């Protein structure tokens, strides 16, 4: 399954529109190119509808949300829905502020993303309406039955495939659930590791829009395994990030560990 998902990206070479965190936009563009897709990073409200109309997927990342960016995301999301292409929402920092949380809820309600990729703190904030005191940093929380239940509940509520990243990852469509044991702690020391995963997920979904659950599972599995393989003893964070890009260029799909529940 993983090899086929990846092959489709390289064969179809989809165009992925990212309205993303300006802190990590270049990395998101580069990782999109690395996996065989083509990125567009437009966020001007006056052009995002036209841009989205020529794309194969739309990734919305709220890491540096603003009023102007929210407007752009809503316009682009409407265009994506009209065209029938996958929309991936990365609700970075959900629960940190009322503005951010309201913006994310508006995106979910109006755009109706097919995929929501988030960490456990953001998941709990959306499910329980609690304050997120972790900021935008990835949660280190272990996967528990409670977390899986929250993810399944959010999937049912939003009709989206939910991808939760953490020490282990969860992907669920409310009925089918996959748990992936991969990644490396060094990934938490790179700004934008989660943002890049959302970009990869967008590329995989764009080329496999008829099998979204498999596409999201493959994105998490491949990215996590490459994160493991990129590490070596004594490596620094800059070198590690470069090695992650190298591993993602030609990933070894045979070693991915996926547990279906």
Image (spheres, helix red, strand yellow):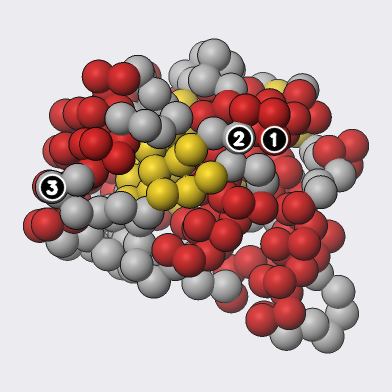
Q: Position of residue 246 (x, y in %)?
A: 77, 62
Give the residue at x 47% y 19%. 174
**Residue 55 occupies quadrant:** top left
Q: For the N terminus, which image quadrant?
A: top right
Left or right, 165 with reference to 42? right
Spatial separation of the CA atoms under disc 1 and disc 2:
5 Å
Residue at the image position 73 percent from the left and 85 percent from the top: 236
Which percent across, then down, holds residue 128?
A: 27, 42
Which residue has dot 2 on it?
A: 13
Q: Residues within 10 Å of mark 2 (few under 14, many from 20)?
A: some
User: Residue drawn 76% across and 68% down?
Assistant: 243
Label 3 environment density (alpha carbons within 10 Å; few <14, some 14–19, many ≥20): few
Identify whether 71 is placed above or below 207.
Answer: below
Q: Nearer the viewer, residue 31 or 106?
A: 31
Query: Are the residues flagged by discs 1 and 2 in contact, CB closer than 8 Å?
Result: yes
Task: Tell me the SS state at disc 1.
Answer: helix
Q: CB under 8 Å between callouts 1 and 3?
A: no
Q: Considering only order in the chain, which callout, 3 or 2, is on the residue closer to the N terminus?
A: 2
Q: Secondary structure at mark 3?
A: loop
Between the C-alphas of marks 1 and 3, the distance is: 31 Å
Q: Residue 10 — which label?
A: 1
Q: From the viewer's perspective, tell me whether residue 117 is left or right of residue 101.
A: right
Write the residue at 83% across / 85% down: 234
Front residue of 34 and 127:
34
**Mark 1 packing: few (<14 Cα in 10 Å), some, or many (20+)?**
some
Q: In the rendered image, is residue 151 in sight?
A: no
Q: Is residue 168 above or below residue 6?
A: below
Residue closest to the eye, 5 or 192: 5
Instruction: Residue under label 3, please give it.
Output: 46
Q: Tag count in the figure?
A: 3
Closer to the chain start, of discs 1 and 3, is 1
Q: Are marks 2 and 3 in contact (CB under 8 Å)?
A: no
């Amino acid at each position: 399954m993983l090899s086929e998902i990846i092959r489709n990206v390289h064969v179809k070479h989809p165009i992925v529109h990212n309205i993303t965190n300006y802190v990590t936009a270049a990395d998101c563009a580069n990782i999109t190119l690395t996996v065989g897709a083509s990125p567009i990073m437009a966020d001007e409200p006056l052009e995002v509808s036209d841009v989205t109309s020529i794309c194969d997927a739309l990734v919305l990342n709220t890491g540096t949300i603003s009023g102007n960016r929210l407007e752009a995301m809503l316009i682009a999301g409407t265009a994506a829905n009209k065209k029938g292409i996958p929309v991936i929402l990365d609700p970075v920092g959900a629960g940190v502020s009322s503005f951010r949380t309201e913006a994310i809820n508006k995106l979910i309600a109006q755009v109706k993303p097919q995929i929501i990729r988030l960490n456990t703190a953001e998941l709990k904030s959306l499910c329980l309406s609690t304050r997120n005191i972790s900021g935008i940093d990835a949660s280190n929380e272990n996967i528990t039955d409670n977390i899986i239940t929250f993810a399944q509940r959010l999937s049912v509520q939003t009709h989206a495939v939910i991808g939760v990243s953490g020490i282990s990852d969860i992907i669920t469509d409310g009925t089918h659930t996959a748990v992936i044991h991969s990644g490396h702690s060094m990934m938490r020391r790179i700004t934008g590791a989660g943002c890049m995963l959302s970009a990869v997920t967008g590329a995989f979904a764009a080329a496999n829009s008829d099998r979204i659950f498999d596409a999201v599972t493959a994105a998490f599995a491949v990215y996590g395994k490459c994160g493991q393989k990129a590490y070596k003893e004594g490596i620094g964070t800059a070198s590690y990030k470069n090695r992650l890009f190298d591993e993602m260029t030609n990933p070894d799909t045979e070693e991915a560990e996926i547990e279906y529940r």
